[in-house]
Image (cartoon, rainbow, N blue to C red):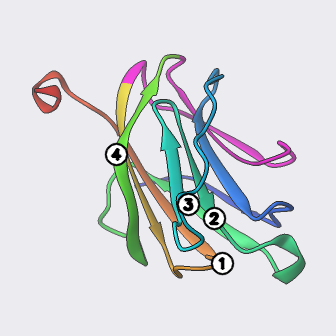
Amino acid sequence: MLLRELEAGFRWGVLLVTDERATDEIPGWTSNEERVTSSPTAAVVRVRHRDEGDVIVQVWDDGRAVRGGLAFSGVLDLGSGVLKVSDAPGDYILRVPVGIGPASLEVYTDAAVEATHVDLVVAPRTPWQMV
């Protein structure tokens, strides 16, 4: 099911997906081809710069309707229980209540460079998924 949607111009060409209270530093890119970099509480996705046009970001609770190729699959620690999806300066923000604790995150993009559509699939991890 579609939880939230954002259409915006991303001034720095990056989409932030974080725990609402995340303060850890996000590692740098390992190469120019890398689409996503992450830390325990955040992921950063390269997207089209706003000078080139808007980007559509959709947040889903399952992957049945996603488009594009898988760019990232991992786990974010959501200590606040809220996933924050935003541009770098925080001009555009979506807040998605997910639940406190680890959450699975999958990022799908329509292009390897300058994505114009990003699907985020987020779901709390159950205890049996953590072993």
Q: Which residue is mark 3?
A: 58
Question: In front of the other: label 2 or label 3?
Answer: 2
- The residue sitting at 34% across, 45% down in the picture is 74
Image coordinates of residue 96 in percent, x first then y, are 56, 37
Could you say where residue 79 lies in the image, as x and y percent from the top left? 49, 17
Gap in angstroms between the C-alphas marked 4 and 2: 17 Å
Mark 2 burial class by Cα count in 10 Å: few <14, some 14-19, many 20+: many
Mark 2 and mark 1: Cα distance apart in space: 6 Å
Q: Earlier in the sequence, mark 1 or mark 4?
A: 4
Q: In the image shown, does 94 or 69 lie closer to the viewer?
A: 69
What is the three-letter code of the residue carrying label 2? Arg
Residue occupied by mark 1: 114
The boundaries of the magenta stretch are: 80-101
Drawn side of residue 23 relative to residue 88, left or right = left
Q: First in sequence, mark 3 or 1: give its number.
A: 3
Which amino acid lies under the numbered mark 4 shown in the image of this protein? Gly
Q: Which is more N-terminal, label 1 or label 2?
A: 2
Query: Which amino acid, by three-letter code, is at mark 3?
Result: Gln
Q: Are marks 4 and 2 in contact (CB under 8 Å)?
A: no
The kind of secondary structure element at disc 1 is loop
Residue 74 shows which numbered tag? Answer: 4
Q: Nearer the viewer, residue 13 or 64?
A: 13
Mark 2, residue position: 46
